[in-house]
């Protein structure tokens, strides 16, 4: 079974379309989404429609929660973006389309088990909001142990927008370290982070996603250029979205 894993789209339609086209060019059995379809970006409704159509399931991220229910612990720009995002769904005139979107958003899962993988947006102990940062592998051994203790076998999560693999040493490997293909056959537990489709934060502005091959026991990581200028100028044209949200797409942070 080959599963494409996408996460943290953040209303960035150009990035999502680029990633889906790339997935379509590879042989993949299913696509799953680890959450944060919404927030920051200018095309939340279009991204929800595409995820609903193309993904087998999607998780609830903190920005999805923020737009749907209430933004908690957001900075001012993110909070304003959350309210603007919600208004886009409220503004839909076609009642059927609006109902279909709300139903999809209301059905987003907090966690799900997919074969050997426990899937969450954040961490297994705080699935919506807790970050598992690459530095935690070195600086927070207790946190790492508590998180690995909650994982029956393997796990996958998004939220940090930084792609790579955590192992039980504990350690974190960015995709460059294993030349973008990791074989987990001999690993007791791993946690995969596919990186972010629409708002990468590892100083590489290209979209990120991963393909898990359960027979080959490999995780392959991909980076793709997309039309950042187009997204950034759309953000600049929306007064409720801070210019900074567009500018940082160019910087990958
Ligand atoms: Zn996110």
Image: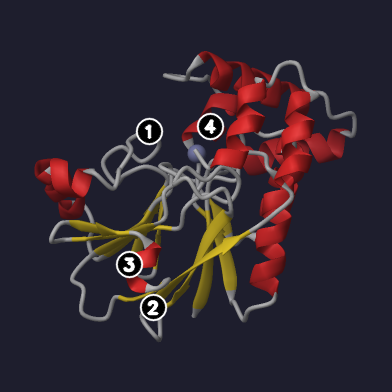
Point out which mark residue 218 bears: 2
Label 1 near label 3: C-beta < 8 Å? no
Q: Residue at x 67, y 52 (%)?
A: 51
Query: In the picture shown, does residue 131 fall above or below 158?
Result: above
For label 3, the residue is 177
Asked which quadrant contains residue 103, the reply is top right
Residue 190 image offset from top left, x and y in percent? 26, 64
Marks 2 and 3 sit apart, C-alpha to C-alpha, by 15 Å
Q: Secondary structure at mark 4?
A: helix
Marks 2 and 1 sit apart, C-alpha to C-alpha, by 28 Å
Local packing at callout 1 (Cα closer than 10 Å; few below 14, some 14-19, many 20+) is some
Residue 220 image offset from top left, x and y in percent? 45, 72
Q: Can residue 53 be seen here?
A: no
Point out which mark residue 63 bears: 4
Q: Seen in the image, is 20 located left or right of residue 147?
A: right
Marks 4 and 1 sit apart, C-alpha to C-alpha, by 9 Å
Q: Residue at x 29, y 76 (%)?
A: 184
Residue 2 image offset from top left, x and y in percent? 51, 77
Q: From the Cβ of disc 4, is ligand 1 less than 8 Å away?
A: yes
Q: Residue at x 65, y 20 (%)?
A: 242
Q: From the Cβ of disc 3, is ligand 1 less than 8 Å away?
A: no
Q: Residue at x 69, y 73 (%)?
A: 24
Q: Nearer the viewer, mark 2 or mark 1?
A: 2
């Amino acid at each position: 079974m080959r599963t494409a894993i996408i996460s943290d789209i953040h209303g960035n339609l150009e990035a999502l379309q680029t990633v889906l086209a790339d997935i379509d060019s590879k042989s993949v059995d299913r696509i799953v989404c680890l959450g944060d379809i919404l927030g920051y970006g200018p095309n939340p409704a279009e991204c929800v429609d595409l995820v609903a159509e193309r993904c087998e399931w999607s998780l609830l991220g903190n920005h999805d929660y923020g737009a749907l229910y209430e933004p908690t612990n957001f900075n001012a720009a993110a909070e304003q973006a959350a309210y603007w995002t919600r208004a886009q769904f409220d503004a839909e005139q076609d009642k059927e389309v609006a109902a279909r979107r709300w139903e999809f958003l209301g059905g987003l899962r907090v966690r799900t088990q997919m074969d050997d993988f426990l899937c969450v947006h954040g961490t297994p102990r705080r699935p919506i909001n807790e970050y598992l940062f690459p530095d935690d592998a070195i600086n927070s051994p207790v946190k790492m142990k508590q998180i690995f203790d909650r994982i029956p076998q393997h796990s996958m999560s998004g939220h940090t927008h930084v792609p790579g693999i955590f192992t039980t040493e504990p350690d974190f490997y960015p995709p460059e370290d294993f030349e973008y293909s990791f074989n987990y056959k001999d690993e007791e537990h791993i946690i995969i982070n596919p990186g972010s489709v629409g708002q990468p934060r590892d100083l590489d502005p290209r979209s990120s996603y991963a393909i898990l091959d359960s027979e080959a026991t490999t995780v392959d990581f991909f980076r793709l250029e997309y039309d950042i200028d187009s997204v950034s100028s759309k953000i600049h044209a929306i007064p409720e979205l801070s210019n900074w949200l567009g500018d940082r797409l160019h910087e990958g942070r």
